Image (cartoon, coloured by chain):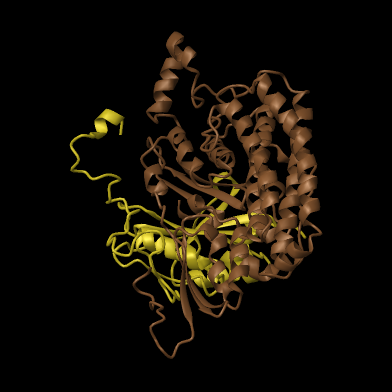
């Protein structure tokens, strides 16, 4: 509760309004954030968002960590698609250092990032369905997030907070089991996604609950700084992967799905369509990998790429580089760089200022959830409470990304 | 839509604002320049509404340089989605009187970005509709991203920086 704001109470005997504390730990918010809303019957009269419940001062911590130690911090932003954050950060540093990745590394990264995007969209879309009352679809599709996490586990050993990859590539090559699991996923997931769509796309109850609800015009979405599926559902075809391709996205052939009205149904459709595109991108990437030299999983930049432990113990140069990287003594240009990637929720930007010290002078995360969420309270005014709940689900607000 | 180069943007800006545009730089292809706080809103409005078409406010943040005379840089990242070009605008302000006009008159997106910047750097955005802390608690009393505030309690005896290479 904020002390500078008027505290809404229902003590006034004349008042017909009811104050409701939605959150910080409310099952319907799917995350730790609070909205104090005033209700006239079931209609929202006003709302105040309070955030910051899990603020962990990442930007301050990042000023005290060498580059490679910042990757685990990025895990904990949008923890539903951590690999995108990890690789966004790696690519930011690589941009600063002017390192170019071999194509095979780019394609491996694309595979991992698109798997994360699918995991992120699975969460959002199944939660929309769940909040409109369709538990079946939630349970049915959610198992595929588990399969994606199994793939991550095979690649990097971790599931949720992945810390995947290194500055300069991956820590190890994908093994056979990882490829087998990816191939299996590509066979089974489309079947389930098709079934998921057939359960909801033309479902009368689902459409009644979502169509026309919380519609947002393109102008308003841009004015409020929306990016990602939310902006695209309002009809703006902005996708960082296309407008400023990174990690060789320009080699891939994919569509940018857009909606028309920006309502919850459109957001659902856009996310579903993006999952299909992601599946296609992964298939293309696997095909392209066949034409790349096997076994290349990092760039040849020994001064920036953390060497394998075996090398460190047996090779003098590797030991020196290891020491320098761990102590943050790499020779990075004194410069500032902004790099953006298309995260699960929109443009995830890293603004890095390096002054030649062991740690960044300043690192700022442009977090899409934070910027997308500020429209929630103003747009809820006049909405039914139950519509506001699914509106919140469809914005896919991840508390870690919201609060940094 | 025709592409626009950094030089064209810069020429248009210089023609309008002349000597108010300084410190021009192009790190990694991203046009960066400095301006002053009395014209910042005019500069942003010009970028947004003229042919350069910077319709999207990507980010507002700040950087603290304790050794400089004007120690806080407020940094704006704008993006022209139509012309696929970005620009970075910096305004250096006095860290003892950190005030700057608000950009919420141009973009609603600026609201929380400015609240965050106020919360962490104490920059007061004049005319902001609701300038309160956003992520930290109201009782915090300091603006923690300023460089004079250490990451950890300096009085701790069990953790010495020298052991951690810091």
Q: Position of residue B139 (x, y in %)?
A: 28, 63
Q: Is residue B79 visible?
A: no
Decide if residue B65 is on the left or right side of residue A278: left
Chain B, chosen colour in render:
yellow
So how many labels did they put on this image? 0
**Whether residue B166 is situated above or below residue A76 in the rendered picture:** above
The single residue placed furthest to the top in the displayed view is: A314
Pick whichever, A389 or A338, lies toward us. A389
Pick whichever, A210 or A311, lies toward us. A210
The single residue placed furthest to the bottom in the displayed view is: A14
The chain letter corresponding to brown is A
Decide if residue B44 is on the left or right side of residue A322: right
Q: Residue at x 40, y 24 (%)?
A: A324
Q: Residue at x 78, y 53 (%)?
A: A199
Q: Quadrant of residue A330?
A: top left
Q: Position of residue A148 (x, y in %)?
A: 64, 35
Pick whichever, A307 or A58, lies toward us. A58
Q: Quadrant of residue B52?
A: bottom right
Task: Quarter of the image for the N terminus of chain A: give it.
Answer: bottom left
Q: Residue at x 61, y 69 (%)?
A: A386
Q: Is residue B132 visible?
A: yes
Q: Position of residue A60 (x, y in %)?
A: 37, 47
Q: Residue at x 55, y 70 (%)?
A: B108
Q: Position of residue A40 (x, y in %)?
A: 54, 81
**Whether residue A313 is situated above or below residue B6 in the rendered picture:** above
């Amino acid at each position: 509760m904020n002390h500078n704001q008027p505290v809404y109470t229902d003590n006034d005997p004349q008042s017909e309004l009811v104050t409701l504390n939605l959150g910080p730990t409310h099952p319907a918010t799917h995350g730790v954030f609070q909205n104090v809303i005033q209700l006239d019957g079931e209609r929202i009269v006003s709302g105040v968002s309070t955030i910051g419940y899990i603020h962990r001062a990442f930007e301050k911590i990042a000023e005290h960590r060498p580059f490679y130690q910042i990757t685990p911090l990025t895990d904990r932003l949008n923890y539903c698609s951590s690999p995108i954050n990890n690789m966004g950060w790696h690519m930011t540093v690589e941009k600063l250092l002017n390192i170019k990745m071999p194509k095979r590394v780019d394609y491996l990264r694309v595979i991992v990032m698109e798997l994360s995007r699918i995991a992120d969209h699975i969460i959002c879309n199944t939660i929309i369905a769940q909040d409109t009352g369709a538990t079946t679809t939630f349970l049915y599709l959610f198992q595929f997030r588990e399969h994606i996490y199994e793939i991550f586990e095979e690649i990097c050993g971790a599931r949720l907070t992945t810390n995947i990859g290194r500055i300069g590539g991956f820590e190890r090559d994908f093994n056979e089991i990882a490829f087998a699991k990816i191939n299996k996923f590509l066979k089974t997931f489309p079947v389930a996604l098709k079934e998921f769509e057939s359960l909801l796309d033309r479902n009368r109850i689902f459409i009644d609950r979502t169509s026309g609800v919380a519609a947002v015009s393109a102008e308003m979405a841009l004015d409020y700084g929306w990016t990602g599926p939310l902006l695209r559902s309002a009809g703006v075809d902005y996708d960082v992967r296309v407008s400023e391709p990174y990690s060789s996205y320009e080699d891939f052939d994919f569509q940018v799905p857009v909606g028309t009205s920006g309502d919850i149904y459109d957001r659902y459709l856009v996310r579903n369509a993006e999952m299909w595109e992601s599946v296609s991108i992964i298939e293309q990437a696997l095909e392209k990998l066949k034409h790349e030299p096997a076994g290349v999983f990092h760039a040849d930049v020994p001064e920036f790429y953390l060497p394998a432990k075996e090398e460190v113990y047996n090779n003098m140069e590797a030991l020196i580089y290891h020491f320098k990287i761990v102590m943050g003594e790499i020779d990075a240009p004194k410069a500032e760089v902004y790099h953006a990637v298309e995260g699960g929720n929109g443009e995830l930007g890293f603004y890095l200022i390096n002054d030649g010290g062991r740690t960044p002078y300043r690192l700022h995360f442009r977090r899409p959830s934070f910027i997308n969420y500020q429209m929630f309270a103003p747009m809820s005014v006049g909405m039914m409470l139950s519509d506001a709940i699914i509106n919140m689900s469809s914005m896919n607000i991840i508390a870690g990304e919201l609060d940094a | 839509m025709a592409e626009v180069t950094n030089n064209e943007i810069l020429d248009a800006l210089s023609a309008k604002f002349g000597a108010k545009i300084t410190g021009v730089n192009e790190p990694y292809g991203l046009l960066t320049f400095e301006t002053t706080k009395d014209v910042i809103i005019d500069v942003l409005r010009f970028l947004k509404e003229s042919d350069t078409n910077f319709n999207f406010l990507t980010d507002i943040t700040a950087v603290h340089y304790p050794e400089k005379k004007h120690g806080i840089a407020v940094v704006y990242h704008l993006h022209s989605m139509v012309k696929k070009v970005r620009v970075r605008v910096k305004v250096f302000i006095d860290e003892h009187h950190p005030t700057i006009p608000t950009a919420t008159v141009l973009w609603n997106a600026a609201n929380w970005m400015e609240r965050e910047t106020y919360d962490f750097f104490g920059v007061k955005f004049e005319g902001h509709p609701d300038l309160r802390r956003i992520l930290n608690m109201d009782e915090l009393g300091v603006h923690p991203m300023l460089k004079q505030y250490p990451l950890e309690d300096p009085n701790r005896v069990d953790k010495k920086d020298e052991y951690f290479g810091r």
